[in-house]
Image: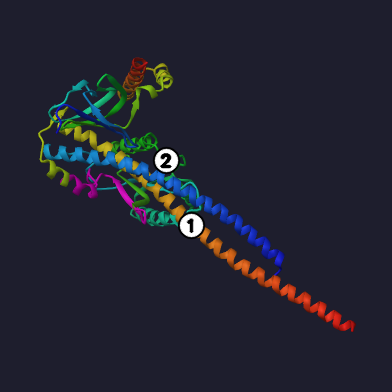
Amino acid sequence: MANTRALVKRRKAIRNIRKITRTMELIATARFKKAMDRAIEADAYTRRLAELAGDLTSSAATIKHPLLEKRAEIKNSVLLVMCSNRGLCGGYNASILREAAPHLRKMQTEGVNVHLELSGKRAMAYFRFQGIAATHAYSHFEDKPSFEEVDVVASRYLADYIAGKIDRVDVAYMKFTNVAKQVPMVETLLPLSTHVPESRRKTVSAAAENKGSVEYEFLPSAAEILEEILPVSFKIRLFKCFLDSAVSEQIARRVAMKAATENAGDMIKDLSLKYNRARQAQITKEISEIIGGTAALK
Amino acid sequence: MDLQKLKCVVVTPEKAVLDEAADFVAVPMFDGELGVAPGRLPIIGRLGSGELRVTQGATIKRLFIDGGFVQIRGNVVTLLTPKAVFAGDINVSTAQTVLRSSKPETTPEAQEARNKSEQRARAQIRIAAKSK
């Protein structure tokens, strides 16, 4: 029979672990709410920007912009992988890396010179283990990425892209669709496919129909404003990726910690049962020994 | 729609900074200031870095705006900007260090960037001084 003392010790250890995982779950829930609020605030900006772009395109002629043109030959590209800085969030990092690694291999076999850029210590650790060097690595994007920080990275991409140093920018991250569903994916941010994301399109056109078209005055000209909007919309899309991954990380951590807490509870129940049985067995053994002893004395 | 009142909305990518009624709004455009009174015709324009004044009755709210776009439509003034700071929250000392540390540049691009940052810093100091 198992040692009762060892069982008590294990049960105690698991109780402590459960305390920690439960606290982490609560913290992740609080952080998730904050991150979610930020994402919603950012959404207001993207929506209004899309509205503005929609109004512009309806009154301006089609424009040509280097950011919109797809280049015939892709020689250099950037792959930005967004992971978390911390672990204990279930399959969050693994699922992103599972998307990113094949993409990287595929690009390399096609003869593209891929500049790997990483965000988050987990991604750095993974690619260091794989022996793949990264050109840039960031670990300062925590659960509250600020626009200014993202702006620095985005501006560098834009400058490199326009200068022709890179022909394509991809981002591997966890896309947030709703609280129950997040999808790991690789998205191409440059060249900009459309300056309005597909999902926003409908709402914009619907809004335009409701209001009817309005004759705008433009300062300076519509085409010039549209040219200015394109870089901004790229920046906001990159920012949105960072926000999405922050929200998704907290959700993943909450789910993982919830499961861990539940498992710890089950384990404690199981160990308690084993402990009680062992104790009972020990008592029975002692009694039978005493009875045996008295019987021998008679 | 009420013709007597404007609605001023300021949003940055991080949050909605301002959303309230106003009698008069002065918007910093790329080439100067644009005053907006109720009933203005629709306009879309580019912003420069400067001061946004929102007048409501006797109170004037001052904000530092750093570029972006403005859209005016049906008495709603919407400003989309990467950065908006209330005059009271402007950090004057960082703006002053920017001014002090700025040096002449050799290339035209660097020169332009320097001019922009100087302009930005000057605007911040000016607005902060006014609000005192």
Question: In the figure, is residue A278 to the left or right of A140?
Answer: right
Q: Position of residue B22 (x, y in %)?
A: 23, 26
Q: What's drawn in magenta, residue-wise?
A: A178-205
Q: Where is residue A205 in the image (x, y as percent from the top left)?
A: 16, 46
Q: Is residue B16 magenta?
A: no
Q: Which of A217 and A78 is in front in this view?
A: A217
What amino acid does circle 2 point to?
Lys
Disc 2 versus disc 1: distance between alpha carbons? 23 Å
User: Height in image: A103 above or below B27?
Assistant: below
Disc 1 chain ID: A
* Pointer 2 and pointer 1 on the same chain: yes
| Camera sees residue A1 | no
User: Height in image: B84 above or below A93?
Assistant: above
Mark 2: few/some/many CA within 10 Å (<14, 14-19, 20+): some
Secondary element at image label 1: helix
Q: Residue A258 carries which label?
A: 1
| Camera sees residue A245 | yes
Question: In the figure, is residue B72 to the left or right of A181?
Answer: left
Secondary element at image label 2: loop
Question: In the figure, is residue A141 to the left or right of A267?
Answer: left
Instruction: Tell us which disc is closer to us: 2 or 1.
Output: 1
